[in-house]
Image (cartoon, helix red, strand yellow):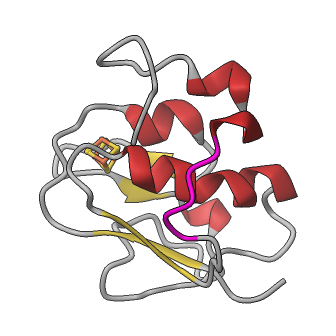
Amino acid sequence: MAKRRIWIEDGCIHCGWCQHLVPAVFVAADDGTRIVGTARQDGITSNNRSERSPLRAGRLPTDEIDFMPFVADGCPARVIHLDGWSGLGVADPALAPSRANQHPSQGVATPA
Ligand code: SF4
């Protein structure tokens, strides 16, 4: 697997969308969403902004990895940054239909 990195910029509005969809990667904190340490090579739980630690290979199922651009596209604050995905910006809700219909703040997930 190519090295893939996720980090969270300033401006998270704590809507819960990312954690709701991929709790193995995103976790809410008082100062904004963090990337869970168990999903990262460095094992640190933080926004990963300065570390830019790659995801731990084999830690996430392939469908979760493929789903990540959809999660980033759906972030209302546009603060989820991905590095290493070739399909960035191509949102495909069909990748995880059971979860994509459950936006915690709006009830429906339909990011453009
Ligand atoms: S989807 Fe974006 S705004 Fe919402 S909790 Fe996650 S990082 Fe914050």
Q: Is residue 49 visible?
A: yes
Q: Residue 27 appears at what percent x and percent y?
A: 43, 45
Q: Residue at x 65, y 62 (%)?
A: 38
In percent of width and height, residue 73 lies at: 42, 52
Query: Does the magenta-highlighted stretch encompass residue 18?
Result: no
Q: Quadrant of the C terminus?
A: top left
- Which residue is depicted at the point 63% across and 37% down? 93
Q: Quadrant of ligand 1?
A: top left
Along the viewing direction, whichever of 57 and 67 lies nearer the viewer: 67
Q: Residue at x 44, y 55 (%)?
A: 72
Figure quadrant of residue 37 = bottom right
Residue 89 painted magenta: yes
Q: Position of residue 77 (x, y in %)?
A: 20, 50
Furthest residue toward front: 112
User: Which residue is depicted at the point 67% across and 51% down?
Assistant: 67
Q: In the picture shown, does residue 29 fall above or below 3?
A: above
Q: Main secondary structure of the magenta part?
A: loop
Q: Residue furthest top?
A: 107
